[in-house]
Structures are given as C-alpha cells and as structure tokens.
Amino acid sequence: MITANARAVFSSDGPFKPTTIERRDLDAHDVLIEIKYAGICHSDIHTARAEWGQVQYPLVPGHEIAGIVTQIGSQVTKYAVGDRVGVGCMVDSCGECVSCQKGEEQYCLNGMTGTYGEIDKYGQYTQGGYSTHIVVTEDFVVRIPDNIPLDKAAPLLCAGITTYSPLRHWGAAPGKKVAVVGMGGLGHMAVKLAHAMGAQVTVLSQTLKKKEDGMRLGADEYYATANPETFTKLASSFDLIINTVSAKIDMDSYLSLLAVDGTLVNVGAPPEALPIQIFSLIPSRRSFAGSMIGGIRETQEMLDFCAEYDVLPEIEVISANQIDEAWERVLASDVRYRFVIDISTMGNE
Ligand code: NAP
Ligand code: ZN
C-alpha cells in the first residue's frame, strides 16, 4: 500500500480536513502518479454535498489531475517514469461493451468507474485528486503535451474535455453560431475552444461583469441573461447552445434562441429536473441533448488540440488550506475561471 496525504470532507456540510489515504500496490498495468495540481470542478461540490445522491465519507474529491509518473507496473507499455500525465473523471470501465469498444468509456454500459466516490474492480472506494498520489491503470491515463504547464493542464481533464466533446460532436466550425451559457470553469473553456474551432461565439452570462474577459477569451458577442431583451434580440439565432449552468434555469427561454435544427446541449448538471414545453422544440425541429465528459482517446485529442492552438484555462492557483474558501467562491459565481490546488502545499500539518 502507498500512503498519500489528502484533503477530505467527512460529511455533506463538512469543511476539508487533512487526512491520509491508502493507494493500492501497483498491478501489472498500473502507474503511480505524483500529483502536482488538481482542479476544482463544480461537480466536486455537487458530489461532496450529496446533491446528486448519497456518498460515502470521508470523500477526497478531484478529477482534474496533472502530475508525474513515479513508478510503473511490470507490464506497462504506454508510460515511463518521469512522464507528464493527466487523469480525468474516470479510472476504469468494462472495456468490452459497445461504448468501450468505440472509445467512449464514459458511456460504458456496465458503468465506468469514477475517479472518486465509487467502488472499483478491486472492491475499493475510489478517492480523487485532492491528494499527493494516485494509482491508475495506464489505459485511463493521458499524456500532457510538453508545452502545456501542469497547473494549466489540470482543468483540461474535465472542463476542457466536457466542452470539447459536444462542440466536436455537434460540429462547431466556421459558419456555425455557438452560444455558451454561464462563464465559469466549463463555460470559459467552451468559449476558447469554440473560438479555436472557428465558430462565431456568443456568451450568455447572468450579468455583463465578465464581458471584457469573455471578449478577450474569444467571444464575438456577450449578453446578460438578466436583461429580458437578450431573449427577444437573439431569438432563433444559434446552431448550437452549450449550457454549462450548475443551477436550474428556465430552459424554454434558452431553447427559443435556437435556429431551426439547432441543438441545446446541457453539460451543466443541476440536481433538479429541467422541465421543458415540447412546443419549444416541435415548431423548429430543435433538439435538447446532454453530454458527459469524453472518452480517453478524445481526451488525448483535446489535449493535443489545446497544445497546438494554445487553448489553456485561466486559473487561480491556491494552497490546500484554501479549498473551502474556493468552493464558496465557485458557488457565488466568483471563479476566474478555475481554481487549481498546488498539491505541494499538502503537507499534512
Ligand atoms: P462553475 O465554474 O460554477 O460555472 C457555472 C456557471 O454557471 C457560473 O459561473 C455562472 O455563470 C452560471 N450560474 C451559476 N448559477 C447560476 C444561476 N442560478 N443562474 C444562472 N446562471 C448560473 O461550474 P463548472 O465547474 O463550470 O460546472 C458547471 C456545471 O457542469 C456543474 O453543474 C457541473 O457539475 C457540471 N459538469 C458536468 C460535466 C459533464 O460531463 N456533463 C462535467 C463537468 C461538470 P455566469 O456568472 O456567467 O452567469
Ligand atoms: Zn468535473
């Protein structure tokens, strides 16, 4: 067993406390990663606060992991000691179902294993990246290109791939009008990625407070959703809308912004239902869709794309003692635009 320092919550309302967790000894195909940086995703908060259902405590969140390989199992072929690597939201899947065969492990029909809060094939409860080390099978590890610094790589492992995948799937490209709802961790990556793919990008944020940033990151237009005129002005105009909002919002208003044959993809995952009027879809043959992260192959493709087009997140690096404070700022939509924990500050004092 390998003992790692970590920060965990011990209840749904708990503050973070220093703790230690055990990582398994390396299997033949495992790599041991010394974690350097871990991003803070709003999903960490939904999960730890039991908004999506009960979880077991103590829970160590974190599924935006960037670090260095420090040990490899006897049959590892893809990675060597010293490699710069990342781990996202999944650490395993069945490998046999149609989804896994297609490289879409996130849709594994037998249920992929989440990086934290789930029981893995060893019968152990998985614990995430707010920790100093993790052991992961090599097939669920991706390579971080040399020109991406590790702190900026971390958010790409969830915020990056979760927005890249639907933008690719629904064809964001020159000539396409894409709107991004919510300019937080996922939203700001969606803006940068859609812009890099050549689409015309509009941000729909609650207010205009972050407009200057949005335009700098690649938006062509920026509107406040608190202003009702936004919805009349932009009616029937977008080919694709990526909704990254972590809370319940009125979907019919946003569906009315889609052009004929347009699609609104929800990546935001509020615990509440999002009811819609079917007549928001029927008269313009619109679609309302969902999308979850991306497969391992696509995650590697996204990292290589970000390296080539210099698409990197805007981050605020924090120490391990600042996680509670950072979570409160995420909840207040006061994140610019992803908090990343410097794991070297995780001495368990
Ligand atoms: P985040 O950084 O907190 O960003 C969410 C943004 O939504 C905020 O910055 C804010 O943008 C907007 N927002 C928040 N509350 C709102 C409200 N009441 N009304 C209107 N807008 C509101 O969160 P994140 O890490 O990007 O994650 C966003 C969501 O995606 C979460 O629900 C998360 O669980 C989910 N997620 C899903 C996947 C997936 O695979 N589908 C993967 C990762 C995360 P403005 O300030 O610009 O209005
Ligand atoms: Zn996430």
Image (cartoon, helix red, strand yellow):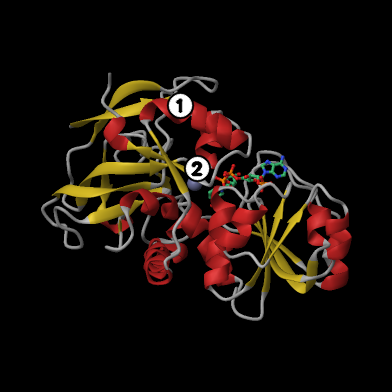
Residue 290: horizontal and vertical position, in percent? 63, 57
Q: Quadrant of the C terminus?
A: top left
Q: In the image as oriented, which residue stretches furthest toward the left?
A: 74
Q: CA distance from mark 1 to mark 2?
A: 19 Å
Vertical position of residue 41 compared to residue 303: above or below: above
Residue drawn at point x = 56 percent, y = 61 percent? 217
Residue drawn at point x = 45 percent, y = 66 percent? 98
Question: Mark 2 packing: few (<14 Cα in 10 Å), some, or many (20+)?
Answer: many
Identify residue type, mark 1: Gln
Residue 295: horizontal and vertical position, in percent? 43, 61
Q: Nearer the viewer, residue 323 or 244?
A: 323
Q: Quadrant of the N terminus?
A: top left
Q: Is residue 203 left or right of residue 293?
A: right
Identify the residue position indicated by label 2 in the image.
Answer: 41
Residue drawn at point x = 54 percent, y = 40 percent? 42
Secondary structure at numbered mark 1: loop
Identify the residue position indicated by label 1 in the image.
Answer: 56
Residue 241: horizontal and vertical position, in percent? 69, 63
Q: Is residue 7 visible?
A: yes
Image quadrant assignment for residue 238: bottom right
Secondary structure at numbered mark 2: loop
Among numbered discs 1 and 2, the one appearing first in the sequence: 2
